[in-house]
Amino acid sequence: MELYQIAADCLEKKHYKDKMYIESLRDGTFGFHGRPLLWLWRFSSRQKKVEIDNEGNGKWKDAINWQDEFQDTNKPLVVDIGSGMGTCILGLASTSANIHDKLPIEWSQCNYAGVDLNQALVRFGNGVASRWPDARKGRVKFFCCPADDFLSNLKSYHGRSTLIMVNFPSPYRLDASERGNLQLPSAENFMVTSKLFELISVLAANDTNERYFMFQTKCEDVAVYLKNECLSNGMEGITAGDKAVENIDTIYSQKSVPKRVKEWLRIEPLAERAEGNLFWSQPILPLDCLPETEIQCLSENKVVHRCLFKYKNT
């Protein structure tokens, strides 16, 4: 709460005109919508990318005792891998939105776990969740550890992992000689690995309940890669219906073609495109639960590539 008081003091000293936002910081009602989400996106986008080195530094050392983290470990669990500022699951834990016909999850009855390597972002999410005095308390927790380690621990969670999300992972470099953003990982160190999909498959095995997987990315090549990985790992794509992307170039013509897409198509001119009935042109999650990066894309008229999958019941 002290952080919000300091933020309010700074805005007042700068003679910020929007008194409503200052008051929301002081009384703890500062919400995740519109302008606040853009502020959080600007902060998170400036964070240095955290990687695990070849010696394993940064690996999670301890097993998770789920009873210490959640009040009721029998509740279904929603997981956000690479959760950033945590706005997506903080929003889902608070939403009153109706159940989506393509994603039949009763949000108010779930626990929520965010996973990120950046300790500052994890502390932010846990700080917000710790201030909740109502029924949301004890249902949200953020963990600072690699995704693979978290999913390995998830095997001992009493309930089921009903939804696992990957929202806007840092893209890999297109090729080893790329001189652009040197913070980007190589393809071999991309967060969403084959091991990650194997771990999710293990969680879904022999479970008659439907489990869902969703990803979102700004990078078309990453979207195509993730879509094909999902299909090859036994997931069933959920079609977007009238919200499907029929032609991605038509959408780019209404917005703009990202520099990365131009470079990708220069390298692979016959590449598969992020279009068809598995790619969603509109948000899948409730509108009051969008990640800060998705809000940034919508506000700046940038393309977002989205897919939703479920594991086939066996």
Image: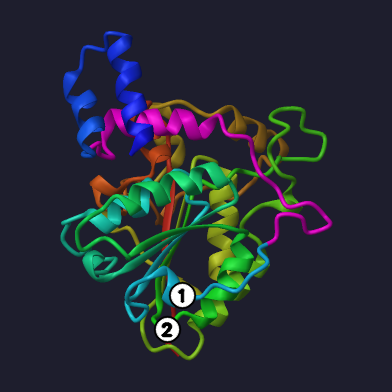
Q: Earlier in the sequence, mark 2 or mark 1?
A: 1
Disc 2 marks which residue? 158
Residue 46 covered by magenta stretch: yes
| Callout 2 touching callout 1 (CB < 8 Å) | yes
- Name the residue at 60% across, 55% down: 225
**Magenta: main secondary structure:** loop
Disc 1 marks which residue? 66
Estimate how packed mark 1 is, as few (under 14), some (14 to 19) or many (20 or more) residues with alpha carbons within 10 Å.
Answer: some
Which stretch did the figure color magenta? 30-59
In the image, 223 versus 45, the foreground residue is 45
User: Residue 172 location, x and y as percent?
Assistant: 67, 44
For residue 249, above or below residue 149: above
Q: Nearer the viewer, mark 2 or mark 1?
A: 1
Quadrant position of the C terminus in the picture? bottom left
Residue 229 covered by magenta stretch: no
Q: Is residue 71 visible?
A: yes
User: Residue 90 location, x and y as percent?
Assistant: 33, 52
Q: Is residue 86 visible?
A: no
Quadrant position of the N terminus in the picture? top left
Location of residue 220 (image quadrant)? top right
Looking at the rendered structure, the secondary structure element under dot 2 is loop
Scheme of image coloration = rainbow
User: Residue 67 location, x and y as percent?
Assistant: 42, 77
- Name the residue at 60% across, 74% down: 63
User: Residue 125 location, x and y as percent?
Assistant: 41, 48
In the image, 78 versus 252, the foreground residue is 78
Looking at the rendered structure, the secondary structure element under dot 1 is helix
Estimate how packed mark 2 is, as few (under 14), some (14 to 19) or many (20 or more) residues with alpha carbons within 10 Å.
Answer: some
Q: CA distance from mark 2 to mark 1?
A: 8 Å
Q: Amino acid at mark 2?
A: His
Q: Amino acid at mark 1?
A: Trp
For residue 118, above or below residue 65: above
